[in-house]
Image: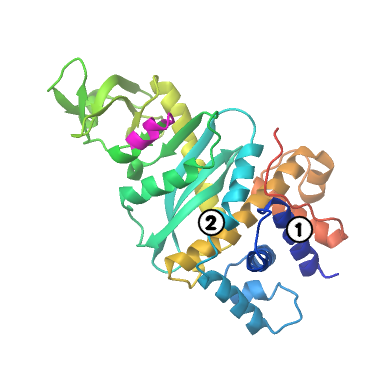
Amino acid sequence: MSDNLKRYCAIRDALQQLAPKQMTGNQIRHLRTLAALISGIVGSGKVNLPAVASKLPDGKQRDSRVKRFERFLKNERVTQETFFLPFAEALLASLPEGPLVLVMDASEVGRGCLALVVSVRFKKRALPIGWLVGKGNKGHLAQEKHKELLGQVALLVPPERRVVFLGDGEFDGCGLLAALGERGWAFVCRTAKNVQLEEAEFPGCLFSFADLCLCMEPGQLIEVSDVRFTAEGLGPLLAVAVWQSGCKEPLFLVSNLELGQEALFWYRKRFLIETLFSDQKSRGFHLHKSHLWEPARLGRLLLASCLAYIWLVFLGAQVQKNRLWRRLVHRAGRCDRSLFQLGWAWLEECLNEGWRIPVAFTLSKQ
């Protein structure tokens, strides 16, 4: 059996184990095409369809395989609800106990499109659990899109789990923050220095973060509790201005947590989502070089690239736990590879040695 066939069969079997049991015949065929896409993306390190098709052994011409993938990406019946959310729900259930740290951010994909993604923190990686794709270059998406994606992801989160939501300055809209608070989720979002604030004890006395940082110095943190946020008066909330050592200017945060240091502790974990985007793009699957321009098709392509990413992180986590495995793919003493890179290296080792290929889209609680 060829390496490409072994990889595809292992992925197909793992997907079928977690897929909804009531799938129709057409949905089962779509699931197999999804397995082929995942296998081809990992095998080629690219998302462009000819490269993906070159890693799928099915006895047909490459052009036929490309057309098969094109039909999959055009098919309106291929949805996140059927072909991703069951896997995302299982992923969240498999994570260690403790707060779920969710991060929302956007990144350019394909031609002239933005992917708005929510990911969950696992160790030093951010694992995607939901997304929306829309037209637009780098910049802000409408707040209604933020709330739409939030509602989609909220259906996956077990009600008993504590959630901490993190976002940069794009996600400080009052509508989104109010929706987070209504769900009982903690949040920490970056905001602008000129945003309007009002202390509950001094109604009508307005100020901004710019006023707070007039006398700030590097290494200093200022927090003001029980404030009303923006002209809409959302609150009471916590306003935090912090000037971290080595930074050129202060950072401004708004949160429904009680302490500034706690808000800063969580916000520092937001940057993990940048590793997700870099692994999906320049350091991994080159999603930014896809020639697709239609948002719905890019959204379906993300079904495959995100599941591929979760699988490789799973492999990396297994390698990290097993000293013998780690020594085979990395130098002894110090490991400077990410879980994503470790997983990819271990897959190649399995194929080289003819070993069984472990495939899973959940993570052992550890």
Span shown in magenta = 177-186
Few, some or many residues within 10 Å of mark 2 (<14, 14–19, 20+): many
Identify the image's colour scheme: rainbow, by chain, secondary structure or one colour: rainbow
Q: Foreground residue, 325 or 195?
A: 195
Amino acid at circle 1 = Asp
Q: Quadrant of residue 223?
A: top left
Position of residue 348 measured from the top left corner of the image (x, y, whole percent): 77, 59
Q: Quadrant of the N terminus?
A: bottom right
Q: Residue 13 carries which label?
A: 1
**Residue 272 position in % (x across, y down):** 52, 42
Residue at position x 67%, y 68% from top? 29
Count residues near mark 1 (Cα–Cα under 10 Å), then give few for <14, some for 14-19, many for 20+: some
When the figure is inspected, residue 216 is found, relative to residue 295, above or below; the finding is above
Front-most of 150 and 352?
150
Residue appearing at x 58%, y 56% in the figure = 82
Please give the name of the residue rendered at 21% of the width and 28% of the height, measured from the top-left corner: 197
